[in-house]
Amino acid sequence: MLRKIKELFRREGLELSDEQVKKFEVYLEELLRWNRVHNLTAITEPEEIIKRHFIESVSLHRCFQEAGFDWKGKKVADVGSGAGFPGVPLKIYLEDIKLYLIEASSKKCSFLEYLKVKLGEDYEVICDRAERVEKKFDATLSRALGEFEEVHKLLENLSNRYVFVMKGKEIKREWIAKLGYKLCNLKLSFIPESYVLWKRLP
């Protein structure tokens, strides 16, 4: 599986170190093991997990670059993190971000805390509803949190500078025209269209 992980990432123009490949393999194994009991993800085929969860999450760093977000040493919050997407794959890939995972489900928080130990990664799990979190972050991220009209307000409230929302291909014109968001295309070979909405706050 190590070779497969490296190959799939490379196909999308993403190079991994041997240590990163091993961490993604551990992540995959633990996600599949926990999923049998706790139903953490609807995607259960290993190659699809690598593509749709790991690679899609990591590719968000291209939108960081496009937005001019210098992530080194910055506080980044993954809001509604679930089983750790996109935050944990980004942490493995970028390494030097200060990652916070905000998740309301106690079973998912337990998985994220366990995973932190297994991966040897340093991130903080905030097991609470995002509405009740009082910290501020340099950037907030979200992948599958809910309706954009509600989500963007929550993310902007938690951020000092940048907001990134992974929205797939479902984009409404008013999000750009009225709310001031910009579009970043992830350009991945295994999905026809996938966009991230991003905004730099004043």
Image: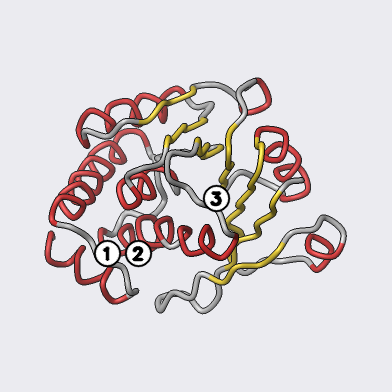
**CB under 8 Å between callouts 2 and 1?**
yes
Q: Can you tell which mark lies on residue 47? A: 1
The secondary structure type at the circle numbered 2 is helix
Q: What is the x, y in percent for residue 90?
A: 39, 49
The amino acid on which the numbered mark 3 sits, given as a three-letter code, is Arg
Q: Can you tell which mark lies on residue 143? A: 3
> Disc 3 or disc 1, which is closer to the eye?
3
Residue 131 sits above or below residue 89 on the image:
above
Q: CA distance from mark 2 to mark 3?
A: 15 Å
Q: Residue at x 39, y 55 (%)?
A: 53
The amino acid on which the numbered mark 1 sits, given as a three-letter code, is Glu
Q: Is residue 159 left or right of residue 109?
A: right
Q: CA distance from mark 2 to mark 1?
A: 6 Å
Say which of 173 and 95 sits in front. 95
The secondary structure type at the circle numbered 1 is helix
Q: Residue at x 28, y 59 (%)?
A: 45
Mark 2 or mark 3: whose residue is earlier in sequence:
2
The secondary structure type at the circle numbered 3 is loop
Residue 181 sits above or below residue 122 on the image:
below
Query: According to the image, label 2 marks what residue?
Result: 51
Q: Is residue 41 left or right of residue 133?
A: left
Mark 3 or mark 1: whose residue is earlier in sequence:
1
Q: What is the x, y in percent for residue 112?
A: 35, 31
Say which of 193 and 156 sits in front. 156
Mark 3 neighbour density, 10 Å: few (under 14) some (14–19) many (20 or more): many
Q: What is the x, y in percent for residue 109?
A: 41, 26
> Disc 2 or disc 1, which is closer to the eye?
2
Mark 1 neighbour density, 10 Å: few (under 14) some (14–19) many (20 or more): some
